[in-house]
Image: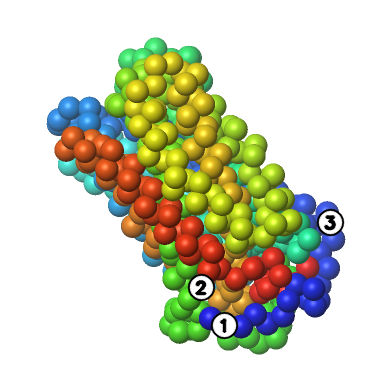
């Protein structure tokens, strides 16, 4: 492990004016919200558009094919993280963030206008795949650049609190996608929603991305990047990251593997789980998912603030440790939930448990790396683990259900969270040994 350059008590650097800091947090957050809204609009509306691109098979088979495209989109995220991480460490955080949102805009508009299988045959799912690959490249670059930028701009005293808004806006994007679905479910007849209404959220996402592109063009560059560029530090190289920071890279991969798997199990898959396993209607499942996500989102800044007080390491270890213990019994109880209230309480318990990881997932990664490789160091292991474990979560869950062994998925999530708890306990205390040197 590379030794910390200094402790937080002895750090000095450029002071960021409060107004500039607030503008940076808001600008980074707004773009992150739109990126994740566009990404999650796919999973939120899968129940309605899957048959247009995959007409063969029953509902579960159609959802599995759509989930496979979802997983392939994750496969593009490590490539996007690698390319955009290098770009952000060379050209700047702001430039990378602007490029990422432009790509997401393109992918969203493409899905909105894609013809279906009846019109163009196999070209329809092929077009959907290409659009998701573009979105995957965009999101792979977005996470590392936004997590790095917001952590660098947050300020050392409340870095956990302010950087938690990176995940708050991630959840807000997912919640917005569900909110659009709920509105359309009430405004449009079911037949219209299934026929053409599912295209509306992708049009909205594309338009929002245009607005964010303009906002990000006016952001200030972070002091950390400016200082590194002025000092003539060598730009990031992939081999440099692996050679000089192997332990940090491996630990981020392990933490993200468990965090992403449990996140997608508790959130995006939950909507399908409540319909396919627990027997709720699509409308009821959407409402339960949205309500639990709202609680999750509101709690995240509190957990970020808590990490500033008790440390990132302890916050992570508690979150993963509790999750490892309760996932199996809670998911089992959810599968037999008899009311929306019961389902809401159980689903909320899962996401609240995960809040300790989610709130600090950005900042703890950024604090482990020096400036010249920070964006790449945050983005690459995160995106790789996300692709392998997060992107396949729904497909694995649906596959095990189809094979008659759904409870094995609960065990899988629990084991991964137990592993992450061990990793967290071995993490250095980044509150005191952060490599973000500037204020």
Q: Is residue 376 left or right of residue 399?
A: right
Image quadrant of residue 312? bottom right
The tag earlier along the polypeptide, 2 or 1, is 1
Percent across and percent down for residue 316 are 56, 56
Considering the image in quadrants, where does the C terminus appear? bottom right
Instruction: Out of 56 and 165, give the one closest to the viewer.
Output: 165
Q: Which residue is mark 2?
A: 248
Q: Counting other residues with Cα less than 10 Å from the Cα at mark 3, is it few (<14), some (14-19), or many (20 or more)?
A: few
Q: Are marks 3 and 1 in contact (CB under 8 Å)?
A: no
With respect to residue 275, does 37 lie above or below?
below
Q: Is residue 181 left or right of residue 116?
A: right
- Disc 3 secondary structure class: helix
- Disc 2 secondary structure class: helix
Of tags 2 and 3, the one toward the viewer is 2
Q: Which mark is residue 18?
A: 3
With respect to residue 401, does 186 lie above or below?
above
Colouring scheme, one of rainbow, by chain, secondary structure, one colour: rainbow
Q: Which mark is residue 113?
A: none
Percent across and percent down for residue 297 are 60, 38
Percent across and percent down for residue 394 are 32, 42
Q: Residue at x 52, y 34 (%)?
A: 349
Q: Are marks 2 and 1 in contact (CB under 8 Å)?
A: yes
Q: Residue at x 74, y 56 (%)?
A: 309
The tag earlier along the polypeptide, 2 or 3, is 3
Q: Which residue is mark 1?
A: 2
Q: Counting other residues with Cα less than 10 Å from the Cα at mark 2, is it few (<14), some (14-19), or many (20 or more)?
A: many
Q: Counting other residues with Cα less than 10 Å from the Cα at mark 1, is it few (<14), some (14-19), or many (20 or more)?
A: few
Instruction: Out of 322 and 284, give the one closest to the viewer.
Output: 322
With respect to residue 83, does 168 lie above or below?
above
């Amino acid at each position: 492990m590379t030794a910390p350059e200094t402790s937080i008590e002895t750090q000095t650097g450029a002071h960021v004016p409060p107004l500039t800091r607030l503008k940076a947090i808001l600008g980074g957050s707004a773009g992150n919200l739109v990126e994740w809204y566009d990404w999650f609009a796919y999973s939120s509306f899968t129940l309605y558009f899957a048959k247009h691109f995959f007409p063969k098979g029953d509902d579960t088979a159609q959802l599995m094919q759509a989930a496979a495209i979802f997983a392939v989109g994750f496969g593009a995220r490590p490539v996007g993280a690698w390319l955009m991480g290098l770009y952000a460490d060379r050209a700047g955080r702001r430039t990378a963030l602007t490029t990422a949102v432009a790509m997401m805009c393109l992918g969203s508009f493409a899905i909105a206008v894609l013809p279906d299988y009846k019109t163009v045959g196999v070209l329809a799912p092929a077009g959907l795949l290409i659009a998701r690959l573009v979105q995957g490249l965009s999101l792979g670059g977005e996470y590392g650049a936004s997590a790095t930028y917001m952590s660098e701009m947050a300020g050392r005293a409340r870095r956990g609190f302010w950087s938690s808004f990176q995940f708050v806006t991630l959840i807000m994007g997912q919640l917005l996608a569900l909110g659009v679905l709920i509105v359309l479910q009430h405004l449009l007849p079911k037949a219209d929603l299934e026929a053409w209404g599912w295209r509306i959220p992708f049009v909205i996402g594309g338009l929002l991305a245009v607005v964010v592109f303009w906002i990000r063009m006016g952001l200030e560059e972070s002091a950390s990047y400016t200082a590194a560029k002025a000092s003539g530090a060598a730009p990031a190289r992939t081999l440099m990251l692996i050679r000089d920071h192997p332990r940090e890279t491996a630990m981020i991969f392990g933490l993200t593997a468990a965090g992403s798997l449990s996140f997608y199990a508790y959130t995006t898959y939950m909507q399908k789980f409540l319909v396919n396993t627990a027997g709720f209607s699509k409308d009821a499942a959407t409402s339960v998912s949205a309500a639990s996500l709202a609680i999750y989102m509101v709690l995240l800044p509190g957990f970020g603030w808590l990490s500033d007080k008790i440390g990132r390491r302890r916050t992570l270890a508690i979150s993963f440790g509790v999750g490892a213990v309760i996932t199996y019994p809670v998911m089992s109880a959810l599968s037999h939930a008899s009311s929306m209230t019961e389902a809401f309480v159980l689903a909320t318990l899962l996401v609240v448990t995960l809040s300790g990881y989610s709130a600090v997932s950005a900042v703890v990664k950024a604090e482990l790396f020096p400036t010249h490789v920070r964006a790449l160091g945050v983005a690459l292991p995160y995106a790789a683990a996300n692709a392998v474990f997060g992107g396949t979560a729904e497909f694995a869950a649906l596959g095990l259900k189809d094979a008659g062994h759904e409870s094995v998925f609960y065990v899988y999530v629990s084991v991964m969270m137990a592993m992450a708890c061990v990793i967290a306990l071995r993490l250095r205390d980044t509150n005191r040994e952060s490599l973000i040197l500037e204020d």
